Image (cartoon, rainbow, N blue to C red):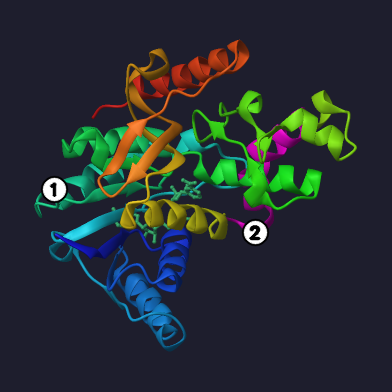
């Protein structure tokens, strides 16, 4: 296996933006782009390759499944995307069928690396990829609520006028309408969020919490309404996960992975904080949640379970 070689399957808005972001990180020496529309994959590869003199040495080219066997990482961004007003779960049947086509073509190549799923609904498709591939659970990761948590930290940082890197806060659960904000653990450099709000002159906690959470949840809908798709934010979120994997960081990120008893959940993929390193998911963490948050997490898991019961894998 060549850990410096990766593939992206699906070169639409999200796949090509991710390739562009990865080119600038200099993590890989070889990046293969695969799409059902080969012409598109070729065009995206050429466009990004032309920026190489300003970035890092990396071969980027349009390929096919015969190129993925020795990859250390495959990122899947193929599939239908949300239309204005459409929920992520509405994509499920179409995209599960696409995964039934893609995953066996990967396993046929004796791929031994990590599968990183980005297509929506990401928690359902991460479970589908795990189930169809038969790979160990640590090797199948969904981008989960890494993007939602970034949106959350960004909005909190705007509210409080501090650097978003100093804001520690997470969205967990489904990457979708039933996700929840872990307010009980949110802090700015160790100062509990409500205390920090007061330091910055904000006392309207209930109202601000509701508004910020609503804006996080509605971000994708709003952007899709305004420009048709979301891709730069997710490309940066995916790049963050890839850095953790390739540099074997042991970073704690709210990715989607298989639950086996954590939080009382099992046999589904959902986003909760996990330690992410070179071999994928090193450990799922059970962070402290208050009663309301725990109930909301169980509700979110139930929503996913209901969808899983309706699909055949
Ligand atoms: P897009 O621009 O329509 O691109 C999808 C691409 O997939 C197209 O180029 C298709 O040709 C290709 N494709 C379809 N079927 C196959 C197949 N069987 N094999 C190979 N390629 C195929 O969509 P976009 O890039 O905007 O979105 C891609 C997926 O990412 C969607 O499911 C989105 O909902 C999802 N997103 C996930 C996010 C996350 O945080 N996890 C965020 C944003 C979008």
- The magenta span reads 209-229
Q: CA distance from mark 2 to mark 1?
A: 36 Å
Q: Element under label 1?
A: helix
In the rendered image, which residue does mark 2 sit on? 227
Q: Position of residue 239 (x, y in %)?
A: 44, 58
The quarter of the displayed image where residue 194 is located: top right
The dot on residue 107 is 1
Determine whether label 2 and label 1 are within 8 Å by CB.
no
Q: Is residue 216 magenta?
A: yes
Going from N to C along the chain, the mark reached first, 2 or 1, is 1
Q: Element under label 2?
A: helix
Q: Is residue 186 magenta?
A: no
Foreground tag (2 vs 1): 1
Q: Position of residue 57 (x, y in %)?
A: 33, 81
Tell whether circle 2 marks a residue whose Cβ is less than 8 angstroms from ligand 1.
Answer: no
Dot 1 crowding, Cα within 10 Å, few <14, some 14–19, many 20+:
some
**Image quadrant in which the N terminus is located:** bottom left
Lateral position of residue 134 relative to residue 45, left or right? left
Q: Nearer the viewer, residue 240 or 199?
A: 199
Q: Nearer the viewer, residue 173 or 43?
A: 173
Give the residue at x 34% y 57%. 247
Give the residue at x 32% y 60%. 8
**Image quadrant in which the C terminus is located:** top left
Lateral position of residue 44 relative to residue 130, left or right? right
């Amino acid at each position: 296996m060549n850990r410096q070689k990766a593939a992206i399957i699906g070169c639409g808005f999200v796949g090509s933006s991710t390739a562009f972001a990865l080119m600038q990180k200099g993590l890989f020496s070889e990046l293969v782009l695969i799409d059902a529309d080969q012409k598109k994959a070729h065009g995206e590869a050429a466009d990004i390759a032309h920026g190489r003199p300003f970035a890092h040495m990396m071969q980027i080219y349009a390929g096919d499944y015969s190129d993925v066997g020795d990859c250390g990482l495959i990122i899947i961004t193929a599939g239908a995307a949300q239309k204005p007003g459409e929920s992520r779960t509405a994509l499920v049947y179409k995209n599960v069928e696409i995964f039934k086509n893609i995953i066996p073509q990967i396993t046929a190549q004796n791929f031994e690396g990590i599968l990183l799923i980005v297509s929506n609904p990401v928690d359902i498709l991460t479970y589908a990829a795990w189930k169809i591939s038969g790979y160990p659970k640590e090797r199948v990761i969904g981008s989960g609520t890494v993007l939602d948590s970034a949106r959350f930290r960004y909005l909190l940082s705007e509210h409080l006028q501090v650097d978003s890197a100093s804001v520690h806060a997470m969205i967990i659960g489904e990457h979708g309408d039933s996700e929840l904000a872990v307010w009980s653990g949110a802090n700015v450099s160790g100062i509990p969020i409500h205390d920090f709000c007061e330091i910055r002159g904000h006392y309207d906690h209930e109202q601000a919490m509701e508004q910020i959470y609503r804006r996080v949840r509605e971000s994708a809908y709003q952007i899709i309404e305004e420009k048709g798709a979301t891709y730069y934010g997710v490309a940066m979120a995916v790049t963050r996960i890839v850095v953790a994997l390739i540099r074997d960081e042991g970073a704690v990120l709210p990715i989607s992975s298989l639950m086996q008893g954590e939080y009382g959940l099992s046999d589904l993929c959902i986003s909760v904080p996990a330690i992410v390193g070179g071999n994928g998911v090193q450990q799922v963490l059970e962070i402290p949640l208050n009663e309301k948050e725990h109930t909301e997490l169980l509700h979110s898991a139930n929503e996913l379970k209901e969808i899983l019961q309706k699909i055949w894998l």
